[in-house]
Image (cartoon, rainbow, N blue to C red):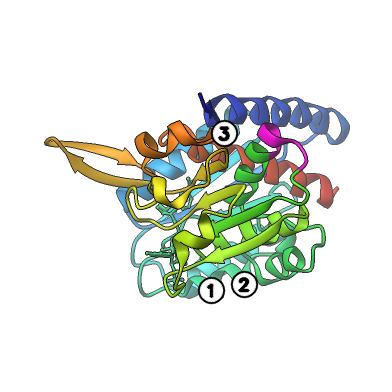
Amino acid sequence: MSTRIDGKVISSQVLEEVKKDAAEFYQQFGIKPGLAVVLVGEDPASQVYVRNKTARATESGLNSIEYRLPEDTSEQTLNLLIEKLNNAPDVHGILVQLPLPDHLDEEKLIAAIAPEKDVDGFHPVNVGALSLGKKSLVPCTPQGCMIMLEKTLGDLSGKHAVVVGRSNIVGKPMASLLLKANCTVTVIHSRTTNPKQLSQQADILVAAVGSPEMIGKDWVKPGCTVIDVGINVIEREGKRKLVGDVNYAEVEPLVNAITPVPGGVGPMTIACLMRNTLIAARQQH
Ligand code: NDP
């Protein structure tokens, strides 16, 4: 029997810790750690994410400030808001919900956020610090995966970790964090010629591809630990269903431990956003 790595349980432990630390922060400085969430446009999925983020922030004792801007917001208007938030002493974390409408340049916008308030960990300064193995604000999803791995396996030193996917928001920072934890790291991407052969060598397998149930039993070594980052909506037996990048039914009987979808990495991402806001607030005081 494999262990089900329960993201709901672990994320509520992280959030409890944030709540306790936020209360201490308030006692010490007379101000709550502040998170500004900026949403441009009406994308329904983004609206749900933003609602969830602000709700979790409030529950965790953070001061959450939401900015909703119309779809046709100009780059100049958005930059002015970012500048205002960069200079606001009661705002410790700034999150701009992605994707942005097509006329806005995401890279430019991320670079405009003050690195010490970049709670998504996407600013080039934070990306650079992570790849140098230095202290930085780390992207929330890979950070959540690391917390789950360390809770499940303890010390990760010497393990062979295989990351499937090399995006800037998941795959690459995940590989950097695993390397920092002294794993031997292999990254698989769409041009890798022998992906299954490589992933069969993994003690830790992280799937961040965006391809429903692509990772089947022929990708895993028996006894390995699997983190499934993928969130894919599929249609099965006439119903909409959420599945990961891993074929859970096929892989689960073979492995030591595995995250489910939903209820695995998803809740950890939001919990780590709150954790990052607290870290940012502490660094700014
Ligand atoms: P991207 O589309 O940005 O990246 C996907 C990566 O997978 C790319 O590096 C791509 O390679 C690689 N890839 C695609 N097809 C294959 C293949 N057949 N074999 C090997 N590698 C392949 O996705 P993201 O990293 O943003 O997201 C990945 C998944 O994680 C998605 O399902 C997303 O919804 C989910 N997600 C979940 C989060 C959560 O909170 N749980 C947060 C963020 C994302 P190449 O670079 O060569 O194109």
Q: Is residue 235 magenta?
A: no
Calculate the distance from the C-alpha at mark 1 to the C-alpha at mark 2: 6 Å
Residue at 44%, 38% (x, y): give it: 51
Give the labeled residue for mark 2: 111
Amino acid type, residue under disc 3 in the picture: Asn
| Image quarter where ligand 1 lies | bottom left
Mark 3 C-beta to ligand 1 under 8 Å: no
Vertical arrangement, residue 2 with respect to residue 74, above or below:
above
Q: Which residues are magenta?
A: 150-155
Instruction: Identify the residue at image location x=47%, y=55%.
Output: 208
Q: Residue at x 35, y 34 (%)?
A: 249
Disc 3 on helix, strand or loop?
A: loop
- Give the main secondary structure of the magenta stretch: helix
Q: Secondary structure at mark 2?
A: helix
Whether the residues at callouts 1 and 2 have beta carbons within 8 Å, the answer is yes
Q: Which mark is residue 43?
A: none
Residue 87 falls in image quadrant: bottom right
Of discs 3 and 1, which sits in the foreground? 3
Q: Amino acid at mark 2?
A: Ala
Which residue is found at the position 34% from the left and 55% from the top?
211
Q: Earlier in the sequence, mark 3 or mark 1?
A: 1
In 3D space, how far apart are the residues under numbered discs 2 and 3 (Cα atoms)?
A: 40 Å
Provide residue 190's location: percent of width, then percent of height: 42, 70
Where 235 sits versus 130, above or below?
A: above
Q: Are marks 2 and 3 in contact (CB under 8 Å)?
A: no
Disc nearer the start of the sequence (2/3):
2
Position of residue 125 in the picture relative to residue 8 (left or right): right
Which residue position holds label 1? 107
Residue 72 at x, y percent in the picture: 34, 67
> To which residue does mark 3 refer?
256
| Mark 3 Cα shell of 10 Å, populated few (<14), some (14-19), many (≥20) | many
Three-letter amino acid code of the residue under disc 1: Glu
